[in-house]
Image (cartoon, rainbow, N blue to C red):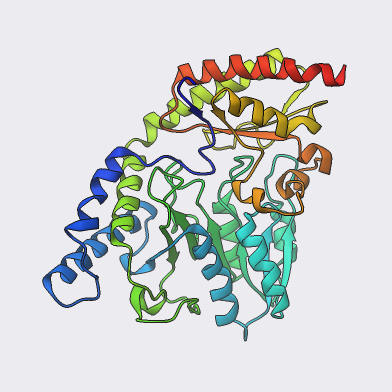
Amino acid sequence: MEKRIYLDNAATTPLDPRVLESMMPFFSQKFGNASSMHSLGTESKNTLEICRQQISNYVNAGTDEIIFTSSGTESNNMALKGIAFANREKGNHIIVSAIEHDCILNTCKWLETQGFYITYLPVDNTGIVDIGKLGKYISHKTIMVSVMHANNEIGTIQPLEEIGKLCKERNVYFHSDACQSFGKMPIDVQKMNLDLLTLNSHKIYGPKGVGALYIRKGINITPLIHGGGQEFELRSSTENIAGIVGFVKAAELCISEFASETKRLTTLRNKLTESIFSSMDNAYLNGHPTLRLPNNVNIGIHGLEGETIRLLLLLDEEGIAVSAGSACSSNDKNNSASHVLQAIGLNPFEARGSIRISLGRFNTETDIDKFIEVFQQTIKQLNPIFS
């Protein structure tokens, strides 16, 4: 088989060799526990605080407002559950968008069993939340609004500044899951009036198993994990210094290369979409046409909705990796249609029939040319089924 073409970077990204190089000393030489009093421990503690400072700089937060976690999923769980249980006296109402990641939606389902009331904020047919309805839904019992910055399936970018302004005016905490957008878009927690922000590493060419949560100073939040009191007594567990170093190096590379990489990915994405839509009258784009991540393409093909899995397998046989949506959705034993695609107006059949192509740092124009060629050939193999 020729070189594999990986176009599923929204699921995870390969570790950048520069990130791996930065991590290596912390596996075997600088291995101290950051809570230990000896020099090895002090060295790790100093490294941890330098990393915390760097992440805080990238989102315009205070150093003591960043805690490191094991993942975006943990950060999202902590944000919602922590705020819910710490603020029960104020109210029991939480608002989340209808197109949140499963870790938000499943957390909300669990919170409903604990006496909390969840409102699912609708979106339009491009995936943008309805801010007018958000204003109507906020009540005196509302304690939190959570809207992801950019959607993991369709790439649509939300107007966080506008949402944050409304939440601040109504004295409601505002959280955003920025796992897909961090490193691809500027994020300023002050400008966006964010009270909590979820970040993770493995979507930006860093290691898996590392995330972070920004918590605005002064916010009362209940910890999920109790133990030795690490991370300002909010997230006990010995810190993963090697992973955190890799996370920060990955973030540093994304921020430093932001302008050139955004331009490059946008060019490749546009070439891909223009080729597909010029050669296929029955193809359509899911998500916002312009307010979307530079590396995201989510398309449906009228008439081929029932053949999505076969299409993915045929592409995989040719060494091309794309997905049918969120990677986490593959764990759904009920094979449910994408809740994101249904929220933007697709019926369940159509919502099972779309593919997500997500580009990354190591994709080249040659990769895109090859994908277009193989994709068009593969579609021809499927067409006779519907003739």
Residue at 44% from the left image edge and 81% from the top image edge: 226
Judging depth in this view, the residue of 342 and 37 nearest the camera is 37
Q: Please give the count of numbered marks on the rendered protein.
A: 0
Image quadrant where residue 83 sits: bottom right
From the top left corner, tell me how far across and down residue 95 is, in percent.
Answer: 68, 65
Q: Nearer the viewer, residue 47 or 26?
A: 26
Observer-nearest of 291 and 275:
275
Q: Quadrant of the C terminus?
A: top right
Hey, which residue is sitting farthest front in the picture?
1
Q: Is residue 193 left or right of residue 166?
A: left
Name the quadrant containing residue 371. top right
When the figure is inspected, residue 194 is found, relative to residue 355, above or below; the finding is below
Q: Residue furthest right?
A: 387
- Give the percent coordinates (x, y) of residue 221: 49, 77
The residue at 72%/74% (across/down) is: 112
Residue 16 appears in the rendering? yes
Rendering coords of residue 80 (x, y %): 58, 69
Q: Residue drawn 63% across and 67% down?
A: 107
